[in-house]
Image (cartoon, rainbow, N blue to C red):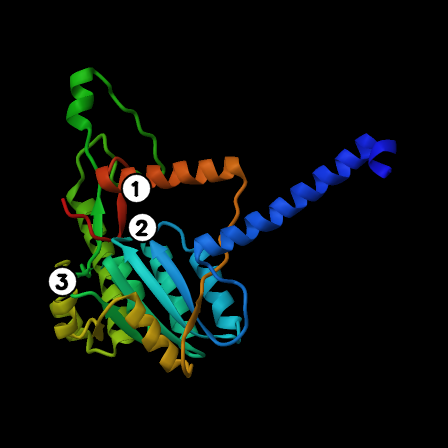
Amino acid sequence: MFSRRHPYLFFLLVFSAIIAGSSVVLSLLNVVYQGRSEIGFGEKVGIIELNGVITDSRQILEQIKDFRDNDSVKSIVIRIDSPGGAVGPSQEIYRAIRKTVEVKKVIASLGAIAASGGYYISAAADGIVANPGTITGSIGVILGYTNFEALFEKIGLSPVVIKSGEYKDIGSPVRKMTDAEKKLLQEFSDNVHTQFIDHVAEGRKLPSSQVRDIADGRIFSGEKAKNLGLVDRLGNLEDAIEWAGRLGGIKGDISVVYPPEEKLPFMKYLMEMSADQLGKFLSRTNISMITGGYLYQPY
């Protein structure tokens, strides 16, 4: 018998087979339990999830492009649960969706909250579905910082700043802001706010003046947003998938597909998770220099 003549080699072969079989089983279980079906053929609706504060657009942009170029994906639903975030990433995602609607239908599904930058992104889609109680709107721009000047004086610290331009330390937390600096930042905020209004008007096919009338940072329920023309339909994710599938020409039952989950090395995962948590902490406390964005901050 081979197992008796070469027991160690036999053990290694059996052990390798067990490891290989376990890997296959675990991979299949991962697909099943994650609910991210990548198996099968036919026409599908692609679902992209945008959750949390928007600080980076890279992954979402890649997912949009992959679904846009995939012929089996007939339409896309972008599921948004976000209070907004940084201006640049929000604008990049908006632009990617506007590019995509030229070749296939995109429907935005608003979850618990899709405010400020979250709503900004949804406005790029062909249609928007919200729950009646979804928190949305908040069309505005916020700039903020914390001034520690009084605290530094109490503990005897005297910060020293050397700069090469008048406005290089604008928003410094160790001194009062000048009138000229306030004016400059207000002009910046107004300019970015106008971009927000114009892009919502473009995506929703509304007059800019109509959007400007309600673009004062106020939030709306999904029901109120529908009455204002900011949302098309009231419903949940399932309703959004059904609408997207029919718009994409799918007959009968509608299958969905999610992007494959990105596998990160363990240390990189920890570093990115820590950076994300730090960003969320800073966005809540404003402990930074000037922070600005399309962000709903209920404080």
Q: Quadrant of the N terminus?
A: top right
Of pointers 2 and 1, the one earlier in the residue sequence: 2
Q: Give the secondary structure at mark 2.
A: loop
Residues tagged 2 and 3 counted as in contact (Cβ below 8 A): no
To which residue does mark 2 refer?
52
**Coordinates of residue 86 in the picture (x, y in percent):** 32, 52
Measured in 3D between alpha carbons, the distance from the residue under mark 2 to the one under mark 3, in whole angstroms, is: 19 Å
Q: Give the secondary structure at mark 1.
A: helix
Q: Is residue 119 left or right of residue 265?
A: left
Of pointers 1 and 3, the one earlier in the residue sequence: 3
Q: Residues within 10 Å of mark 3 (few under 14, many from 20)?
A: many
Which residue is at the front of the view, 182 or 80? 80
What's the amino acid at mark 2? Gly
Measured in 3D between alpha carbons, the distance from the residue under mark 1 to the one under mark 3, in whole angstroms, is: 23 Å
Which residue is at the front of the view, 178 or 205? 205
Residue drawn at 29 percent across, 75 percent down: 127
Residues tagged 1 and 3 counted as in contact (Cβ below 8 A): no
**Coordinates of residue 278 in the picture (x, y in percent):** 34, 37
What's the amino acid at mark 1? Lys
To which residue does mark 1 refer?
280
To which residue does mark 3 refer?
220
Quarter of the rendering containing residue 109: bottom left
Q: Relative to 151, say whether 169 is above or below.
A: below
Q: Give the secondary structure at mark 3.
A: strand
Between disc 2 and disc 1, the foreground one is 2
Quarter of the rendering containing residue 118: bottom left
